[in-house]
């Protein structure tokens, strides 16, 4: 009997330990999710464009295909690579983060540049649109773009995990991969079908209030999508700029980082209402300005390189 009680005590202790570790995994995954918020917003804002111009009945299947590709990118390709790097070449994580941050700055700056210098789209009405081919092309392009964003997410996640064991890091990364994919593409599915839902409510609603809400959704979705895209661009610049500045600090270049912290501290000291939020907003603004400047420099260098090699 005493042996059975001892066994039950051991089982209870192991259960508590497992529960505590699961709580730790969940808490760390949530913390990492917050740090990757800028990329998530941009990923959510970018993806709906891949279903534009395709039949409404194919919108959700396309989103599902992209989500499956994203999950494959994160779990099958990027997670093992991230773990191998963390074990055998952890010194590479900071440079890789900075490269990813530079990419985010470039993407954000390019969007802003095209906003003020739009390029006319070629129009060809001579051939009918092959929706199947266009869908395959769109899905492939979306998965390639997702791979870059997912690589940045996984690298940020790995650098943010506070764990001494490899299996715990792997579990946190896997949880982050699944959770982020579900969040992003679940949100995308809602966004791409919102206008259809609103139209159905406006046409077939049983009550005047329901029909009014439906009409408001239909009218408001274009502006809402533009807002989401703008927030995503700002978030890319903010996250990309902060990653580069923190990476420079790791290499001994601390002047910009100190300037950001000093400005944030001055704002916090100068105001008495919402000082914490305003201090954070100051940091985000400076990171964003730095990210925009870095992105514009990269955009100029790449454009010059295309012209030089194009002429060659």
Image (spheres, rainbow, N blue to C red):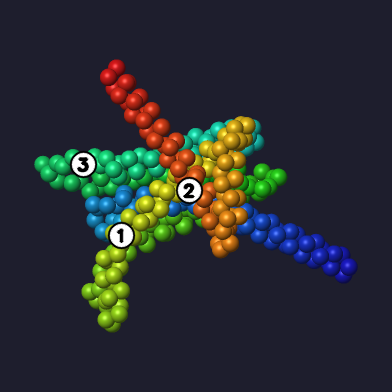
Residue sitting at x 38%, y 40% = 109
Q: Earlier in the sequence, mark 3 or mark 1?
A: 3
Tell me which corner region of the image, top left, top right, bottom left or bottom right, holds residue 1.
bottom right
Q: Does dot 1 land on a helix, a strand or a loop? A: helix
Q: Does dot 2 land on a helix, a strand or a loop? A: helix
Q: Earlier in the sequence, mark 3 or mark 2?
A: 3
Viewer-nearest residue: 243 or 186: 243
Q: CA distance from mark 1 to mark 2?
A: 24 Å
Q: Which residue is mark 2?
A: 285
Residue sitting at x 27%, y 76% = 211
Q: CA distance from mark 3 to mark 1?
A: 22 Å
Residue 223 image label: 1
Q: Earlier in the sequence, mark 1 or mark 2?
A: 1
Quarter containing the C terminus:
top left
Direction from residue 38 to residue 58 in the image, left or right: left
Reply above or below: 38 against 4: above
Instruction: Mark 2: give few (<14), some (14-19) or many (20+) Cα within 10 Å.
Output: some
Reply above or below: 195 against 312: below
Q: Nearer the viewer, mark 1 or mark 2?
A: 2
Tell me which corner region of the image, top left, top right, bottom left or bottom right, holds residue 203.
bottom left
């Amino acid at each position: 009997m005493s042996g059975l009680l001892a066994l039950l005590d051991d089982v209870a202790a192991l259960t508590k330990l497992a529960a505590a570790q699961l709580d730790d995994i969940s808490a760390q995954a949530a913390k990492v999710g917050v740090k990757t918020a800028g990329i998530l917003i941009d990923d959510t804002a970018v993806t709906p464009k891949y279903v534009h111009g395709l039949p409404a009945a194919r919108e959700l299947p396309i989103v599902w295909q992209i989500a499956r590709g994203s999950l494959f990118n994160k779990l099958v390709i990027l997670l093992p690579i991230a773990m191998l790097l963390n074990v055998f070449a952890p010194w590479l994580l900071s440079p890789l983060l900075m490269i990813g941050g530079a990419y985010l700055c470039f993407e954000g700056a390019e969007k802003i540049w095209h906003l003020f210098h739009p390029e006319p789209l070629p129009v060809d009405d001579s051939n009918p649109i092959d929706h199947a081919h266009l869908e395959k092309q769109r899905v492939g392009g979306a998965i390639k773009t997702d791979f870059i964003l997912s690589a940045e997410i996984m690298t940020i996640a790995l650098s943010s995990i506070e764990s001494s064991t490899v299996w715990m890091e792997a579990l946190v990364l896997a949880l982050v991969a699944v959770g982020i994919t579900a969040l992003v593409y679940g949100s995308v599915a809602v966004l791409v079908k919102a206008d259809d839902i609103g139209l159905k409510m406006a046409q077939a609603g049983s009550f005047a209030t329901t029909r009014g809400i439906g009409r408001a959704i239909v009218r408001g979705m274009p502006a809402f999508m533009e807002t989401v895209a703008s927030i995503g661009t700002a978030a890319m610049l903010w996250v990309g700029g902060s990653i580069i500045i923190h990476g420079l600090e790791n290499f001994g270049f601390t002047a910009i980082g100190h300037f950001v912290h000093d400005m944030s501290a001055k704002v916090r000291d100068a105001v008495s209402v919402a000082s914490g939020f305003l201090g954070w907003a100051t940091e985000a603004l400076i990171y964003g300005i730095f990210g925009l400047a870095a992105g514009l420099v990269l955009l100029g260098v790449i454009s010059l390189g295309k012209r030089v090699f194009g002429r060659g």
